[in-house]
Image (tube, rainbow, N blue to C red):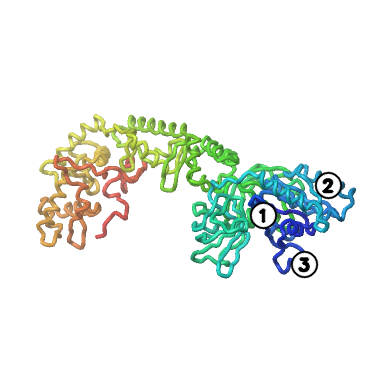
């Protein structure tokens, strides 16, 4: 058990700890000279059962409340020290308010200097103490009169602490490891040592850790837990870790940082939280109000962004966003305290809700509903609530990391919530079972409708489909979700197209009739020099845009290829020309051939022959250097025909664009999701 002292300056906190443990926690020369505590002090008290009580002795002077706050986080039990001759004083009230804001509910009051107060004075002070504690988390705790001079009550208080330690429920060590650093120093022959309270999880000798937010990687060489050598440090213990690694030194690590499981290293400088303003404040909290944020052992400047419509009145509580001057290492559910910028008073505190707060749309009803879910203390309840609120999905990896949950705990949450998970490159996305089923049905309905309306198209673009779905998953998550449906045989993914498994592209009867008339014109003996779109339209007395539209559609279906602008070749003809260039290269001594050699083989004009070769250049089938070309054997199967005489299905006819409004070239009609050989991305075009 970790016991933390609290109380006004000169009420005897350090003297009482020395009487209980035999250890003088004032270690600084200035502390001994001035007779007051300036920084944190530490002591340990072994119990008869082998356990050890740790004491964190804090300064009581108002100038050193920031040091008091650095030691207050992580304590299990508060020893509130009040002198019988003074009674409740200003720092007593501020320390008590801090204890209340940190959610510490177990404690005892030590009425020190009892030898200086007659019985009636004691009774009056005790009555005042009970009244002061009545509205706090320590209401009703025992008050024990003690005197370090006469020894009165010291043994009783020590026994009371032992009894509390035995009654304390052991902290769970199932979370990931976090230790808040309150000291860093160098020991001769040992190296760099950090001390602090283990907030969650456990650490063992040899473990690799990260100092956050700096990101310094280290290895644990040795551990002292509760002032004893140990192989392992556990949640709820004060530990000293001997760290080693590149860059690890006393100057590289400071109070306020945390030693973490590497999986938790994700500092944040924007946090949504609940803020309770102390009743004694004279002014409400207004928009963008500056303050000093104290979290664990860290202290950093912050601005308060109100998420409600009105300022926060004294004594009330409301959601806020904290915009920090510097990032900190934290976890959802951690407590914090706010002090004014002059460091003269504590103004309030609360609990972190979401470490990944958005900079925009932070006050929408949807966002406030999410925060209400984040406010649920139990991870299972919080996850279940988030899955039922927009956007109806949770980045499980981020959720588990920000709550310091292990992989096993995250997996158990998924099981308990009956959630459906989707693996993405960035992590794991979770949806409720009902949400996943609804999304699947919506995808199938949308595709069925699209195929009915557009039977001549291979499918719907992936991004247009995603934007019409609810819930709307992030693009990587939606792709992974569709891949799951494709693996189950319910849909098919073809490049950037999404289609139902059994869908086949069909031409309309009108297009079939027109295609039947076009085939003889671009095939047969004229296959290597087919007429262009304008000429075909004139021959058939059909509008030019209609011919162009149909040929582009057939290009997406893999029946033709647009070798040059408005110049379409049958796919088998393109495959035949691939064989010709292979033969040209094969008969050349060095495997390189000229455009003239290819022109002579296809009996075509030089201009058209060069356009054909440039088409192959763009697709990487040929590699050009000057006036010579050679084949790229790794790309030949793009157009070569199979043994049955049909073109191979290479997926090439699927669009990499995936936009229904994509325009395939200058001065051309919009083509639903398609592209042609002249609109390849710039990095796919070969020089020359």
Say if residue 359 shows up in the picture: no
Q: Is residue 599 above or below residue 381?
A: below
> Looking at the image, which is closer to me, 523 or 316?
316
Mark 3 lies on residue: 34
Q: Quadrant location of residue 147?
A: bottom right
- Residue closest to the far front: 48
Whether residues under marks 1 and 2 lie with C-beta atoms below 8 angstroms apart, the answer is: no
Left/right placement of residue 457 relative to residue 180 reads left
The mark lying in front, picked from 1 and 2, is: 1
Check whether the beta carbons of the residues at disc 2 and disc 3 lie within 8 A of each other.
Answer: no
Task: Count the numbered circles shown.
Answer: 3
Q: Name the residue: 79% across, 48% down.
A: 144
Relative image position of residue 615 (x, y in whole percent): 22, 51
Across and down, in percent, residue 98 comes to 71, 50
Earlier residue among tags 2 and 3: 3
What numbered label is drawn on residue 126? Answer: 2
Report the front residue among 478 and 26: 26
In the visual, does 478 lie left or right of 580? right
Left or right: 612 with respect to 679?
Answer: left
Callout 1 environment at 10 Å: few (<14), some (14 to 19), or many (20+)? Answer: some
Q: Which residue is mark 1?
A: 46
- For the point 73% across and 68% down, the residue is 30
Q: Is residue 35 left or right of residue 195?
A: right
Q: Quadrant of the C terminus?
A: bottom left
Q: Quadrant of residue 687?
A: bottom left
Q: Disc 1 or 2, which lies upstream in sequence? A: 1
């Amino acid at each position: 058990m970790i016991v933390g002292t609290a109380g006004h300056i000169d009420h005897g906190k350090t003297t009482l700890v020395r009487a209980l443990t035999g250890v003088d926690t004032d270690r600084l020369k200035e502390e001994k000279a001035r007779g007051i505590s300036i920084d944190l002090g530490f002591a340990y008290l072994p119990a008869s059962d082998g356990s050890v009580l740790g004491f964190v002795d804090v300064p009581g002077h108002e100038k050193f409340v920031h040091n008091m706050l650095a030691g207050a986080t992580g304590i299990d039990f508060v020893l509130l020290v009040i002198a019988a001759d003074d009674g409740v004083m200003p720092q007593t009230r501020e320390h008590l308010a801090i204890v209340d804001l940190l959610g510490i509910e177990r404690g005892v009051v030590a009425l020190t200097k009892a030898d200086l107060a007659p019985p009636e004075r004691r009774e009056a002070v005790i009555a005042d103490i009970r009244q002061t504690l009545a509205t706090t988390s320590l209401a009703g705790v025992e008050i024990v009169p003690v005197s370090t001079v006469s020894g009165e009550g010291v043994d009783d208080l020590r026994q009371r602490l032992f009894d509390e330690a035995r009654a304390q429920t052991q902290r769970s060590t199932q979370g990931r490891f976090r230790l808040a650093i309150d000291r860093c120093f160098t020991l001769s022959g040992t190296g760099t040592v950090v001390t602090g309270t283990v907030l969650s999880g456990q650490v063992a000798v040899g473990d690799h850790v990260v100092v956050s937010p700096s990101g310094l990687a280290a290895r644990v060489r040795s551990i002292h837990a509760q002032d004893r050598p140990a192989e392992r440090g556990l949640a709820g213990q004060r530990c000293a870790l001997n760290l080693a690694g590149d860059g690890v030194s006393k100057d590289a690590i400071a109070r306020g940082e945390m030693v973490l499981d590497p999986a938790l290293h994700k500092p944040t400088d924007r946090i949504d939280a609940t803020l309770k303003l102390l009743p004694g404040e004279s002014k409400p909290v207004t928009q963008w109000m500056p303050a000093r944020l104290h979290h664990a052992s860290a202290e950093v400047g912050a601005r308060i962004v109100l998420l409600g419509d009105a300022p926060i009145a004294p004594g009330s509580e409301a959601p806020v966003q904290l915009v920090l001057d510097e990032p900190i290492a934290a976890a959802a559910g951690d407590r914090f305290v706010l002090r004014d910028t002059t460091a003269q008073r504590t103004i309030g505190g609360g609990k972190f809700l979401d470490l990944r707060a958005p900079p925009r749309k932070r006050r929408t009803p949807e966002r406030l509903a999410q925060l209400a879910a984040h406010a649920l203390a139990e991870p299972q309840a919080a996850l279940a609530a988030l899955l039922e609120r927009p956007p109806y999905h949770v980045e499980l990896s981020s959720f588990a990391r920000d709550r310091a949950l292990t992989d096993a705990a995250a997996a158990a949450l998924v099981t308990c919530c009956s959630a459906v998970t989707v693996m993405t490159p960035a992590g794991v996305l979770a949806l409720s079972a009902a949400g996943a089923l609804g999304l699947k049905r919506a995808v199938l309905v949308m595709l069925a409708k699209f195929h009915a309306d557009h039977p001549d198209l291979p499918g719907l673009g992936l991004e247009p489909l995603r934007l019409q779905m609810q819930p709307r998953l992030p693009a990587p998550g939606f792709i992974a979700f569709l891949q799951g449906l494709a693996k189950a045989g319910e849909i098919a993914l073809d490049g950037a197209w999404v289609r139902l498994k059994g869908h086949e592209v069909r031409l309309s009867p009108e297009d079939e009739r027109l295609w039947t008339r076009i085939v003889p014109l671009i095939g047969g003996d004229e296959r290597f020099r087919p007429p262009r779109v304008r000429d075909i339209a004139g021959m058939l007395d059909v509008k030019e845009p209609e011919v162009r539209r149909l040929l582009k559609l057939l290009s997406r279906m893999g029946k033709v290829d647009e070798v040059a602008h408005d110049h379409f070749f049958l796919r088998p003809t393109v495959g035949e020309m691939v064989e010709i260039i292979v033969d040209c290269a094969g008969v050349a001594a060095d495997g390189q051939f000229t455009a003239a050699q290819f022109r002579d083989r296809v009996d075509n004009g030089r201009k058209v022959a060069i356009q054909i070769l440039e088409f192959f250049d763009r697709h990487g089938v040929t590699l050009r250097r000057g006036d010579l070309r050679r084949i790229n054997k790794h790309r030949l199967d793009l157009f070569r025909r199979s043994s049955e005489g049909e073109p191979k299905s290479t997926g090439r006819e699927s669009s990499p664009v995936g936009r229904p409004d994509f325009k395939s070239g200058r001065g051309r009609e919009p083509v639903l999701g398609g592209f042609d050989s002249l609109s390849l991305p710039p990095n796919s075009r070969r020089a020359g």
